[in-house]
Amino acid sequence: MDLILADDSVIIREGLTRLLTDAGHHIAAAVTRPEPLPAAIAEHQPDAVIIDIRMPPTHTDEGLRAAASLRGRYPQLGILVLSQYIVPEYATRLLGGGERYTGYLLKDRVLDPAQLTGALTRIVAGGTVLDPDLITLLLRAKRNDGPLGSLTERETQVLRLIAEGMSDKGIASALYVSINTVGTHIRHIFRKLGLADSDADNRRVLAVLEYLQRGRRVS
């Protein structure tokens, strides 16, 4: 797929360029600030952009604001935001509007070419991807919560994979079970958590994120 990188670190840009090129992707452009992104996207029409959260001039949340602006202009553009640290509030800001074609990953996660390509593939297809460490953090914060405490060990595994953006087929493959078994686990999970079931992968991810974030805010 055709990609645009936005990161002010030359090491990250060159590392991602090499990793993605070796994986068969094409880097159409690389920028060091968020301001040139709209022009680069208009020129190259990429499948997705990969944006660092902290960029010049303030190195705070420029990447998040750039992602929000791009989403308004390009509803079906894949946007993968990278962060050095897991910040649940960043994920909420990025995904809170129900956005599809969006992902939030730790930079360490993208060192694995297979994981990075898998995440980009799901995002470009209209899915939503969250970093597994974010899900682990939120689950740990709510480990004493009643509904989560009622989940079996297998249901907790399935919940984590749902939150990572995996489809039923992907979850079945990861856990070596049938798709029907996965469907049964998901129905049990959503019933126990009081969430509306949905066949749309990104809606499932957002429902789980909202549940975990809601519990974290009130805990």
Image: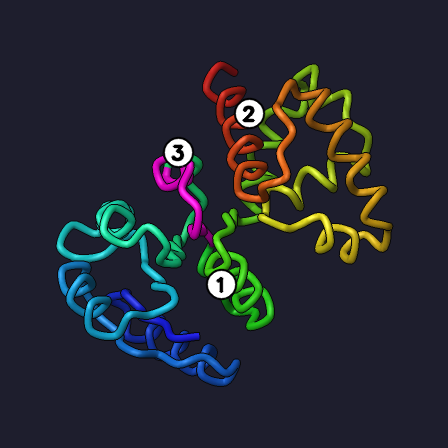
Rendering quarter of residue 92: top left
Would you name the residue on which mark 3 appears?
96
Rendering quarter of residue 98: top left
User: In the image, is 182 to the left or to the right of 121?
Assistant: right
User: In the image, is 168 to the left or to the right of 75?
Assistant: right
Would you name the residue on which mark 2 appears?
211
Q: CA distance from mark 1 to mark 3?
A: 20 Å
Q: CA distance from mark 2 to mark 3?
A: 12 Å
The local secondary structure at tag 1 comes to helix
Reply yes or no: does residue 100 show up in magenta.
yes
Dot 3, how many residues are within 10 Å of its Cα: few (below 14), some (14-19), or many (20+)?
Answer: some
Q: Which region is colored magenta?
A: 90-105
Counting residues from the start of the chain, the first of labels 2 and 3 encountered is 3
Q: Amino acid at mark 3?
A: Gly
Relative height, residue 186 to residue 74 (above, below) = above
Q: Amino acid at mark 1?
A: Leu
